[in-house]
Amino acid sequence: MSKGLTSRSEDYSQWYNELVTKADLAEHSSVRGCMVIKPYGYSIWEKMQAVLDQKFKDTGHSNAYFPLFIPKSFFSKEASHVDGFATECAVVTHYRLKNDGTGNIIVDEEAKLEEELIVRPTSETIIWNTYKGWIQSYRDLPILVNQWANVVRWEMRTRLFLRTTEFLWQEGHTAHATAEEAIAETEQMLHVYADFAENWMAMPVVRGKKTANERFAGALDTLCIEALMQDGKALQAGTSHFLGQNFAKAFDVKFASKEGKLEHVWATSWGVSTRLMGALIMAHSDDQGLVLPPKLAPIQVVIVPIYKGEEELQQISAEVEKITTALKLRGISFKYDDRDTQRPGFKFAEYELKGVPVRLAFGGRDLENNTIEIARRDTRTKETISRDDIAEKIAALLDEIQANIYQKALDFREEMTTEVNSYDEFKQVLAEKGGFISAHWDGTSETESKIKEETKATIRCIPLNNKQEEGLCMVTGKPSSQRVLFAMAY
Amino acid sequence: MSKGLTSRSEDYSQWYNELVTKADLAEHSSVRGCMVIKPYGYSIWEKMQAVLDQKFKDTGHSNAYFPLFIPKSFFSKEASHVDGFATECAVVTHYRLKNDGTGNIIVDEEAKLEEELIVRPTSETIIWNTYKGWIQSYRDLPILVNQWANVVRWEMRTRLFLRTTEFLWQEGHTAHATAEEAIAETEQMLHVYADFAENWMAMPVVRGKKTANERFAGALDTLCIEALMQDGKALQAGTSHFLGQNFAKAFDVKFASKEGKLEHVWATSWGVSTRLMGALIMAHSDDQGLVLPPKLAPIQVVIVPIYKGEEELQQISAEVEKITTALKLRGISFKYDDRDTQRPGFKFAEYELKGVPVRLAFGGRDLENNTIEIARRDTRTKETISRDDIAEKIAALLDEIQANIYQKALDFREEMTTEVNSYDEFKQVLAEKGGFISAHWDGTSETESKIKEETKATIRCIPLNNKQEEGLCMVTGKPSSQRVLFAMAY
């Protein structure tokens, strides 16, 4: 293994970049802004997908698949939608290459498309164009569909997982007979995301509503979950949009109600992406590497034998097999690393870097003493314990680690959430401490834009079930009925 | 429900198209050649994915993800590869749209890419360009990676699932230290595909090797599984390629061997796609609709109550719950369709169309008699049986159906495989009977091309472990040591 990571205090951004590549999570590809998700990184994403997919199915959704390409004309049908995405679209203009006669491969100008195709940055338009054919009457509603897919948004500045030209995500697209139902769906999916973030990723999130400035292009309302990273910046981890009838009107999707009236359909869309990988990494990891919540760790337990000679290794391996059999019965994933090409110290560092929650080291003495050394990744503490009921102890420890890293992140967020009552105080906290800043705001886009221009901080959300409180906007002094959460954000 | 399907004997092709859309499997999108995979169709694909993915993992592979886009220059590096794909590539040339000032959205000519990007038709080039960074020594080998992804090949004539511009697939890409290892991998994955086809899809396949004419662009050898559809045409259901050192040389990927020598790496790639959906449909289905093998059916058992009045329905539902509880324990998927908006006859036809393997109808008399009517989709037979041990009986019946549809397809294929000894006989069988035709061929590309030109039939494969037999080429009369399999093909 190469030398250690840059520390977070030294250069947080550099620490992140090094961690992502050194822990074999992802790397930059030769295609500008596109990443390669490496097997270890992808195995974490697969665990996330599996949990989310089950939650979607448990709430009545089915998966489907819609085209990668969107005709340019579809794009233009919903005005604010095209405004939101037009400047970052990959455009397909031709469908053939040819040899220019001198051995060079060039685009065949004769194979020019009549209408350009956009590589989907999101699929509302192609999906609502499809739903038109699926919906005639109230009996066809609701449609509860999700898609796992790749999408492309031409980003100028990219960072692995956090902002890439191509990324993987899921996008739910639902159609309903009433606004109430669609709003309930929007809220339900936000809570699914929050539950996933908190109980699987061990990452506390604020559930809130975006201001008009920060809304999805084409939505009437955007709900979001916002997490706080260790450098005090916020990260939007998932969004759920109430689209009203905007897309139904743009694509002329109507249904005959029970009363026989023709009405436009109500819509939602909601998504999380491989950006969650970035959030997971930044929420918990330390200067030694990744810290993974046990529920999403591809390997929950690694076992390293420490032995002198082949005979002792065989004795240890026989005992280890008893442990792994017990782990299997409990559905705990493990790896027994008996490679003879690397020393134990190297292996310890490697699994620390990769965030394996629990490490067992089994030495010669443990054979006689019925003991084993157990180390936890989150606290980097270790102790030697009896091997009696070892799987049970490990299961309990995994639960404890899951709870501990959540609590640690929650404590951090609470410490890093500051109420301020003046714009000066706001600027000072932003500059010196960071984190979430809770402040009164007059509710106008103008004030929000001014704050963003002057400080780069944005309103992350208006928390759901927000406490109502009389106050004055910190910038304009106009009356305000509640505080909102500001932060610098990824 | 709309009127029945066109029958297979009337118009096989029309039957297929109607079945795919009426059974809610897929439909054409507004994007030329691209399909929408509908929830029911996608749920079958998901079951296929889950089984295949487990098989890949059981054979030591991990999933990863590589970019959608491939720089044009990468494409040109392996000569036969670019020849094979250049004429069917979607090309991204720009990365921004803009408003032309009159409200029209147009491509922003200032946002032209310096180098065009190809939407991947397959990923060998981008992956081998990546592997260059992953491989230094023999310790880095083998690399056993798979990717689940969408790919695009610009097809002029498309058919749902069978040939679409965009399709979903998996592509395995492995790197090895020796030719022997790579060849063993190629063969292993072919057998994984054959096992899946036969034991999950209930579709017998011939395992074979492609001739030089039919090989993958860039491969030294292409292995394949070939299935026979009910109209007597063959369908290539999966391929596994031994790529030799072609891509390692094109992308300069070398490793230091144990002996310290620098050598080029050996490669394989292998894939199956949503085309398997087309194969599954055509292998078993009948004029009433889909026939699904129980192992891939999203719903294995449907239960329809036949009742007079709410009270009887409640009594039936209570009994049905006992059945579904027992089914759950055995991991059998089911649907209890107690909708009151449709009559039983409508429901029966709907589930026949959708290929649900077993249908239970529970009527008022069954309450007293401890009976139930059980119907199987494959034979369309039904009987009234005792409800004692009902889940056990259903489990046995599902196994029987799985075995029966495989046997039926196998019998059909055997009946439809004909040995011929002259070109006239060949043409006659091709015209009058179809199916696989086993004939002697002189081993030259010229003869193969001539046969294809004159009859449209192609050599589907040289079966693995083919019987060696002295003979004369049916066209040229030159000596031949084995028969090969010809057919008209999808």
Image: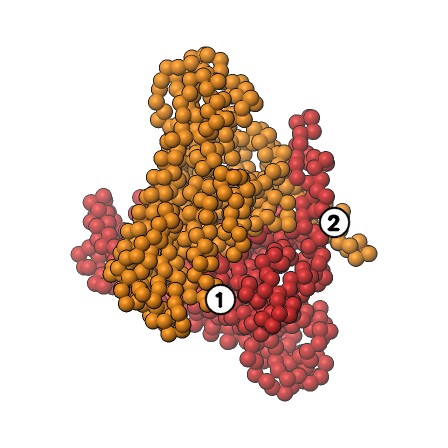
Chain colours: A red, B orange
Residue flagged by tag 1: what amino acid is it?
Answer: Thr
Q: Nearer the viewer, residue A469 or A282?
A: A469
For mark 1, what is the residue? B341
Residue B97 image position (x, y, % from top left): 72, 52
Q: Image point 62% across, 58% down: which residue?
A: A132
Check the image and report above or below for B250 versus B365: above
User: In which image quadrant can residue A220 be found?
Assistant: bottom right
Looking at this rendering, what residue extends furthest in the bottom direction? Answer: A470
- How crowded is the residue under tag 1: few (<14 C-alpha within 10 Å), some, or many (20+)? few
Asked which secondary structure carries label 1, the reply is loop
Q: Which mark is residue B207?
A: none
Q: Nearer the viewer, residue B311 or A118?
A: B311
For mark 2, what is the residue? B107
The number of numbered badges drawn on the structure is: 2
Q: Are marks 1 and 2 in contact (CB under 8 Å)?
A: no
Quote the CA–CA distance across marks 1 and 2.
50 Å
Residue B334 image position (x, y, % from top left): 38, 59
Check the image and report above or below for B192 versus B472: below
Residue flagged by tag 2: what amino acid is it?
Answer: Val
Looking at this rendering, what residue extends furthest in the left direction? Answer: A368
One can see residue A105 in this view: yes
Same chain check for tags 1 and 2: yes
Q: Image point 61% across, 44% down: which residue?
A: B33
Question: Viewed as shown, does residue A203 lie left or right of B454?
Answer: left
Residue B436 image position (x, y, % from top left): 43, 28
